[in-house]
Amino acid sequence: MDGFLFLAGPRAIGDELALLKTLAPAGWRVARATADALLLARDRTPVRDLGRAIVVGELFVRGSGRPAALALPPWPDNGDVAALCTEFLHTYWGRYALIATHQGAVLRDPSGAMDCLVWESAWGWAVGSDLPEGLPPRAAPRDLAIDWPALARGALAGAGSIGLVGVTSVMPGALWTGRDRAQQSIWRPSVFAGDPHDSYAAAREAVRGAVDEVLSAELSSGAPILAEVSGGLDSGIVSTTLARLGGGEGTVFINLHAADPASDERRFARAIADKAGLRLLEREKPELTLDEDALDRLPVGVRPSVNGFDHHYDRDMASEAQAMGAGRILTGQGGDIVFFQSPSPAVAAELWGRWRRHPRADPAWRQLEAAARWNRRSVWSLLGQAVREAWRPARAVEAADHPWLTEPVAPAKRRQIRSLIRAQLFHGASLRGRAAQLVHPLLHQPVQEAVLATPVIDLARGGQGRGLARDTFADQLPELVRTRRSKGDLTAYYGRMILRSLPTLRGYLLDGRLADQGVLDRAEAEALLDPDQLIHVGDYPRLFEVLALEAFVRHWEARAAAWAEGGRARRSASHGKTVA
């Protein structure tokens, strides 16, 4: 698991020793040290120098599928940091943070795969991918507390706030500068959406090239990989591309399934393995229960995470990765977003007017007919929507809750960008993410840029979700998977887990901190936990979000209290007082 911690400001040797004593057992090491700055990196996290700037994390050369050199051309000391970061984003991609130490600035990579947090500590300013267990009080954020208003607004929406006061989250693709304590979006989705590919054929080529590039990069280390093959289109694209690129031998392909017919996708996973000549491991997931012990052991990071609730799956994937020595776990997550799966009547806006796709992949009447079929709407209703959008005057962008949404784009593309914002949740804390790098290749920067520059009318060509992806990778996918319209459904599996766990969950939520602070309405909680509601409505995603928030609050209130107490004890000791 990659990670970093950078502390700026004068320090005593005792401070450094205290850090190493507590963090070294968890794999942290001193990567760089000067008189007024200290960089710690976790496990094998790469560190590259750019003169007086530092890049921490995985870094690849654009268009090559290979890692960047460990020695990079140094940045000029007096260069414009925003311009330098813009050039850097055109040259490299990866999972990283760039720290311009002499200018007090930080750039976070556009994928958001590595978190990037900034805070003030007793030493000075600090930036890190995490607030690791064992961090001494002097290195911890000042006055850390729960941001209750942010939680009430929905900290799981993928926006900037992480639900903590005293910590600033650097947005993906943004540059944070310490001089004005502000962020500037260097990388913006609207730039790519506003410069579409020249044709449908060009879009296909760009998407395939981007997927090949990111998976070549993941294979470049030569380390063993564990790849999940769910049986869906997206994991099928990832696994068959890995095989085509020569990664079949060094990769273990695994399918985890429940006993329910609706969630058992082995037939599709086996077809993928047979087509690509892969050996497939199959593991059945046992029934789940969320008891007090399971809730207490949920992985919690600096953001609320739902990645650990399927704890048998999470534990089994972590165990498989550790047993085979895998450095990476690859998934197909994010494919629904980048390839555009869900129907959207807003796609009609791309048929005429200012958002029109030109040149068209198909005649306008055929695109309209396909879009109507996809949305289960009449041709006339979509035609009316397209004409209204075409004649509507350009207007100022509505107030946005995220900097990626501040510039005008086509309505369906705006929806895709919103989904990319929410996709940051896929990087949340999990056991498998602690055992190895949990990698979602379809969310890497090159793939995002390729699909953002592809109009949704092309992504959904033929009136089917992920139409361009089905077309682009047709040669390597089994027909059974390429033409599949259904998805595996774990509703019954999770429903049984919730019903089995109701006594514990009721106490956890109704007597919890969210309810106590009024963030969770007790009537809503009662409804979420009502057996009849669960059977007939079953809003399991909302229930998992609430449980994740409750676990997050309990964890960070305890951590904040411990740091506050440690700080008081240190101050008392420094004044020669006895501390009980």
Image (cartoon, rainbow, N blue to C red):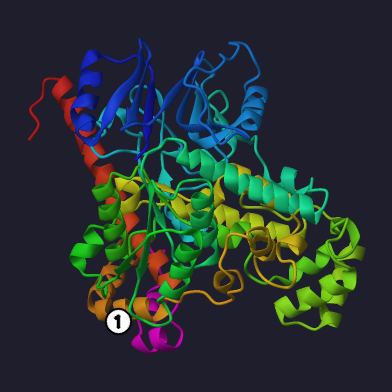
> Magenta segment, which residues?
517-539
Outermost residue toward the right in this view: 391
Q: Residue at x 18, y 63 (%)?
A: 293
Q: What amino acid type should be assigned to the residue bearing mark 1?
A: Leu
Examine the rendering and report whether any part of residue 150 can be seen.
no
Q: Can you say which quadrant of the picture contains the N terminus? A: top left
Q: Secondary structure at mark 1?
A: helix
Q: Position of residue 166 (x, y in %)?
A: 41, 39
Image check: 191 left or right of 323? right
**Which of 435 and 249 lies nearest the eye of the viewer?**
249
Q: Position of residue 110 (x, y in %)?
A: 57, 41
Quadrant of residue 387 in the image? Answer: bottom right
Based on the picture, tell me whether residue 16 belongs to the magenta stretch.
Answer: no
Quadrant of residue 482 in the image? Answer: bottom right
Q: Is residue 70 above or below residue 524?
A: above
> What residue does disc 1 label?
499
Examine the rendering and report whether any part of residue 512 can be seen.
yes
Based on the picture, tell me whether residue 531 belongs to the magenta stretch.
Answer: yes
Q: Position of residue 199 (x, y in %)?
A: 82, 52
